[in-house]
Image (cartoon, rainbow, N blue to C red):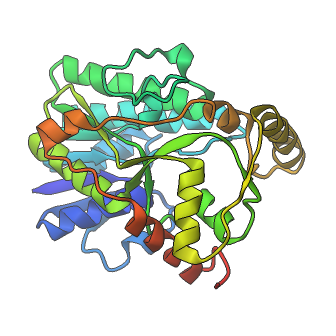
Amino acid sequence: MLAFVTGATGFVGSHVARVLAEQGADLRLLIRSSSDPRNIQGLKADRVVGDLRDPESVEKAMAGCDVVFHVAADYRLWVRDPEQMYRANVEGTRAILQAARKNHVRRVVYTSSVATMGFTSNGHPADEDSPVALDGMIGHYKRSKFMAEEVALEAGRTGMDVVVVNPSTPVGEQDIKPTPTGRIVVDFLKKKFPAYVDTGLNLLDVRECARGHVAALEKGRSGERYILGGENLTLKQILDKLAAITGLPSPKVKVPYVLALATGVVDEIVTGRILGREPRATIDAVRMGRKKMFVSCAKAERELGWKVVPVDDALRRAAEWFVANGYAPQG
C-alpha cells in the first residue's frame, strides 16, 4: 500500500507517518519547501515538494497512491491574515479531494478536529451528533476547520470514500511549533502559569491519535466522522498532572472570565497588532474557554476499536521533549 500523507513534518502527521511505516506501508509525503524536516528524519519515504494551495502540484504528487491521509492544517488561534488560514484549511482540503478523485485513490482519511463539535456551557461531553452550525464556531481556526470538514463530508456523500477523524487535543513529543496545547506545557515548564481559568479540554496521547487514523482507514465507514479522544480534564487538573510529573508548583489562583478576557484584549492589541507577534492570550481562546471541550468517544470505541488511555505518559513525554529540545529550561 502506498500512502500519501500531508502534514508529515508536523506534530500529528509525523506520528501518523511513523505508525504507517511501522505497519509496512510505503510512504509518499507532501512537503512544503519551507517545512522543518526534523520530525521525519530517518523515516523511509518518498518526499515530494508541493503546496496545498497549488492544486496542480498536489495532483501530480499523489499519482499512483492507494490511500490518502490529509493531516496538514494551519492550526493557530491567532492569525494576522485570516485568508491564509482559509486557503490552507478549506481550499487545501478541496484540492486534496479533487486530486484523490482524479487519481482514483481508494480511501481518504481527513483529519478534522473536535473544534467542529457542538459544545455546551454545562460541560456535557459532545459527540458526533451534538447540534452544531457554522455560526457557533468561535475564531477563524474553528470556522475554517468546520468548513473544510463540510467539504470532506460532501465528497463522501457524492461517491468518494472519505472518512473523517476528529482528534481532541493531542499532546506528546515532536510538537515542533508548538501547538496551542503544547504551549500550555511549555508555559508551565517556564513558570509562566501563575493562575488558571475555569475551563477544560480532552487531552489525547498523540501516539494513540496516530493509531486511530490507521484504524479509521481500516474500519471506518465512508461519510462518517469519529472523535478520537482521551481524558476529559479541567485546566487545573492538567496543571496538577504537570506539577506531579515535573515537581514544579501548580497555580492556586483562579482568574475570573472577565479578567481573562481583558488580558486577551490587551495581549492581542499590543503583542499581535502593534508588535506583530503571536500573542500568548487571545480573545478567541478566552471565549472558547467558556465551554469545557469535553467529548465522548463511544462511536469510535464501537466502530474502530478505539480505547481511551490515560494521558499522563504523553504529558511526561511532551515535557521531556520540550526540555531536551530547548523550548524550556532544565529543572
In the rendered image, residue 178, in percent from the top left (x then y), is placed at 57, 60
In the rendered image, residue 67, in percent from the top left (x then y), is placed at 17, 46
In the rendered image, residue 33, in percent from the top left (x then y), is placed at 49, 61
The answer to whether residue 328 shows anywhere in this view is yes
- Residue at figure coordinates x 62%, y 36% from the top left: 289
Q: Is residue 20 left or right of residue 5?
A: left
Q: Is residue 292 above or below residue 247?
A: above
The answer to whether residue 178 shows anywhere in this view is no
Q: Is residue 100 left or right of residue 172?
A: left
Q: Quadrant of the N terminus?
A: bottom left
Q: Is residue 34 above or below residue 278?
A: below
In the rendered image, residue 51, in percent from the top left (x then y), is placed at 45, 48
- Residue at figure coordinates x 57%, y 37% from the top left: 85
Q: Quadrant of the C terminus?
A: bottom right
Q: How many marks?
A: 0
- Residue at figure coordinates x 43%, y 27% from the top left: 124
Residue 291 is drawn in which quadrant? top right
Q: Is residue 303 left or right of residue 172?
A: left
Please state which of residues 252 and 321 is positioned toward the viewer in this rendering: 252
Q: Is residue 164 above or below residue 205?
A: above
